[in-house]
């Protein structure tokens, strides 16, 4: 079946603007993860959803970052008042259940000018 | 601390030759999973191979195999008969069973394949 999809593929925004990044997990996968990949920090875990449970937000770098997952499927990562240091590739992954193999989407490259 | 370390920022191999990418890790957990992911310039993170820590047998997937040394906390990836399409960033990652279930990644090794 279809893999994890993410949109947009690339996003350029101005400092201070809000952005929304979307992730469509593999159908039937209950666990969903967001990671950030930047040159200086490598791959960092941001947030994790399991089914309809409240997400674990402990990895979010600041309160400008938030995420939601509607109906246990599609997830949106929102970054408010973007800063230049938010420039990175944002990767989404899903797995059948917690602790199963994670399958990644193609990522969204965010550039904050 | 739970960590994954890749000490080779870049590696190069001749087409059709064999190359080994190194990875060491640290965890106090007894049950965990280790992975190698490949990330070509397209950015898509592709699963290469997975190893369950409780299995002594090294995982193999076609031309890709691992050398899992649990006592030494070492998890290297061997690519045999290297092909041009193998050129990519390779990330070693550990799933140590934390409450979040998130992966902990190494910094990556950039593999070049020379024709």
Image (cartoon, rainbow, N blue to C red):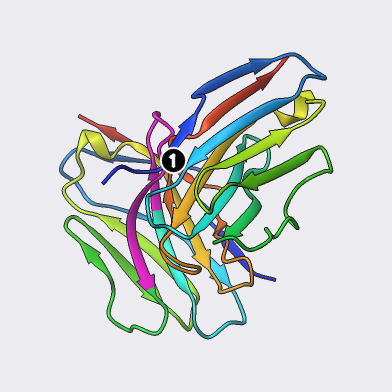
Give the x, y percent position of residue B72.
49, 78
Chain letter belonging to callout 1: A
Q: Please tell me which residue is depicted at 65% across the width and 46% down the height of the picture.
A: A68
| Secondary structure mainly formed by the magenta segment | strand
Residue B110 or A111: which is nearer the viewer?
A111
Residue A12 as seen in the image, left or right of residue B59:
right
Give the x, y percent position of residue A23.
51, 39
Q: Please tell me which residue is depicted at 65% across the width and 38% down the height of the picture.
A: A77
Disc 1 packing (10 Å; few <14; some 14–19; many ≥20): many
Whether A86 is drawn above or below A41: the answer is above
Quadrant in the rendering for residue B102: bottom right
Whether B96 is drawn above or below B40: the answer is below
- The residue identified by callout 1 is A105
Residue B43 as seen in the image, left or right of residue B49:
right
Figure label count = 1
Magenta-span inclusion, residue A34: no
Label 1's element?
A: loop
Magenta-span inclusion, residue B48: yes
Give the x, y percent position of residue A16.
82, 20
Q: Please tell me which residue is depicted at 49% across the width and 82% down the height of the picture.
A: B31
Residue B67 as seen in the image, left or right of residue A55:
left
Whether A57 is drawn above or below A25: the answer is below
Q: Which residues are magenta?
A: B37-51
Give the x, y percent position of residue A53.
63, 63
């Amino acid at each position: 079946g279809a893999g994890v999809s993410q949109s947009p593929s690339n996003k350029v925004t101005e400092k201070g603007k809000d952005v929304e990044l979307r992730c469509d997990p593999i159908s039937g996968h209950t666990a969903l993860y967001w990671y950030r990949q930047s040159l200086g920090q490598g791959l960092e875990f941001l947030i994790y959803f399991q089914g309809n449970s409240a997400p674990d937000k402990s990895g979010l770098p600041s309160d400008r970052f938030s995420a939601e997952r509607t109906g246990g499927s599609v997830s949106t990562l929102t970054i408010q008042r973007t800063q230049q240091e938010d420039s990175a590739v944002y990767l989404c992954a899903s797995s059948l259940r917690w602790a199963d193999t994670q399958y990644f989407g193609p990522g969204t490259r965010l550039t904050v000018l | 601390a739970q960590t994954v370390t890749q000490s080779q920022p870049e590696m190069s191999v001749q087409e059709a030759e064999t190359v080994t990418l190194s990875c060491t890790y640290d965890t106090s957990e007894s049950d965990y999973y280790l992975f190698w992911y490949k990330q070509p310039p397209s950015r898509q993170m592709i699963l290469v191979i997975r190893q369950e820590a409780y299995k002594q047998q090294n995982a193999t997937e076609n031309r890709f195999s691992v050398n899992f040394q649990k006592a030494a906390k070492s998890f290297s990836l061997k690519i045999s008969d290297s092909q041009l399409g193998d050129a990519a960033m390779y990330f070693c990652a550990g799933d140590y069973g934390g409450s979040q279930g998130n992966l902990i990644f190494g910094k990556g090794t950039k593999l070049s394949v020379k024709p």
